[in-house]
Image (tube, helix red, strand yellow):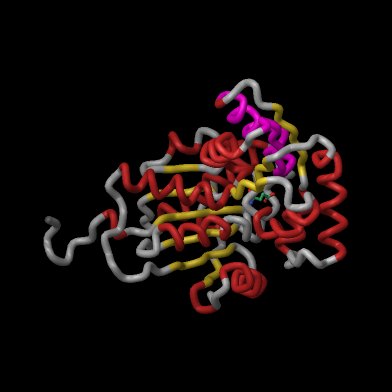
């Protein structure tokens, strides 16, 4: 038993980061799956989007994001970002705490869900160009037919609160990007960027509800719970966990969209942090 007053590592928060709001899809699910865990979220809203940046830049940003979370004493890090998970593939080896990205858990869920073996993958340009999900799927079953499409404007739609399935702009962009995937008669679609579940309804409507959507945020939250259990790092508190959100740009836009998305007011839980000054690699 730890001495009274000492802090157990398991009491520490789970650290989650993304380039912006998208990682909230993982936070939402983590709160459901692990309601007693404390969570520290970092959204790099000053530098979003990551998905059209070079490999070198994405890796540098990912290292800075992880450093920030480590400076807050987190017990685990989740890269709730398809782009980082696809490009900064060595980040895991550099960290002193357990880590997961989104690619492996999401690919596994898609492989389990598909019946026809025809699977679509949508993500940022960096994610699609890396072939990360496609390779992970083909490693699971080489007979799968995988169709990829990058949808970079989806990130901007979400970051700018264009998320209603009834919004004409949302409908138009969804149709433009998903038109050719629809013709491939996929039965499963990986939302390979954590921003995309926020417009899942518009995507599902366009695909006439016929395609199973795999939410990378949700699958990763479930996977992370398994990792914590394996490392005996689950918080044993019976109190609801606390969430703190940090963003690198102004807090107002984040507050507004986070509230719509998480269904609760996160006003006082959001702070600004200047990452460029805090960690320069
Ligand atoms: N949520 C990030 C991802 O999963 C968005 C990427 C971006 O910033 O372009 O890829």
For the C terminus, the quadrant is top right
Residue at the (40%, 50%) spot, across then down: 225
Locate residue 172, reporting x and y percent: 87, 57
Instruction: Tell me which segment is drawn in magenta.
Output: 116-139
Residue at the (76%, 41%) spot, across then down: 150
Residue at the (27%, 65%) spot, across then down: 237
Total numbered circles: 0
Q: Quick check: 146 left or right of 140?
A: right
Q: Quadrant of residue 254?
A: bottom right
Task: Look at the picture and state if 216 lies above or below 27.
Answer: above
- Residue 88 in sight in this render: no
Please tell me which residue lies in front, 51 or 183.
183
Q: Is residue 131 magenta?
A: yes
Query: What is the residue that sits farthest to the top in this orientation?
Result: 142
Locate residue 159, reporting x and y percent: 71, 62
Q: Quick check: 56 left or right of 65?
A: right
Q: Is residue 209 magenta?
A: no
Locate residue 255, reporting x and y percent: 61, 73
Residue at the (30%, 58%) spot, across then down: 235
- Residue 19 in sight in this render: yes
Locate residue 219, reporting x and y percent: 52, 47
Q: Quick check: 23 left or right of 119?
A: left
Q: Quadrant of residue 1?
A: bottom left
């Amino acid at each position: 038993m730890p001495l009274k007053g000492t802090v157990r590592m398991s009491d520490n928060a789970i650290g989650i980061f993304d380039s912006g709001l998208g990682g909230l899809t993982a936070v939402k699910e983590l709160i459901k799956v692990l309601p007693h865990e404390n969570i520290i979220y970092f959204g790099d809203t000053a530098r979003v989007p990551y998905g059209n940046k070079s490999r070198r830049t994405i890796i540098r940003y990912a290292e800075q994001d992880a450093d920030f979370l480590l400076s807050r004493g987190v017990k685990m890090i989740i890269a709730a970002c398809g782009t980082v998970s696809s490009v900064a593939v060595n980040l895991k080896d550099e960290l002193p705490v357990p880590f997961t990205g989104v690619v492996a858990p999401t690919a596994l869920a898609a492989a389990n869900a598909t019946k026809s073996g025809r699977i679509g993958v949508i993500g940022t340009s960096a994610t699609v160009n890396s072939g990360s999900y496609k390779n992970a799927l083909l490693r699971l079953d080489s007979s799968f037919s995988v169709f990829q499409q990058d949808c970079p404007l989806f990130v901007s739609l979400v970051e700018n609160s264009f998320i209603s399935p009834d919004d004409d702009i949302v409908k138009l962009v969804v149709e433009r990007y998903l038109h050719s995937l629809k013709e491939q008669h996929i039965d499963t679609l990986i939302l390979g960027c954590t921003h995309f579940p926020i417009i899942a309804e518009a995507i599902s409507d366009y695909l006439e509800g016929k395609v199973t959507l795999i939410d990378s945020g949700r699958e990763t939250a479930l996977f992370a719970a398994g990792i914590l259990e394996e490392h005996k790092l689950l918080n044993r508190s019976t109190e609801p966990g606390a969430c703190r959100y940090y963003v690198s740009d102004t807090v107002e836009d984040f507050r507004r969209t986070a509230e719509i998305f998480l269904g609760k007011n996160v006003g006082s839980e959001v702070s600004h942090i200047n990452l460029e000054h805090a960690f320069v690699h």
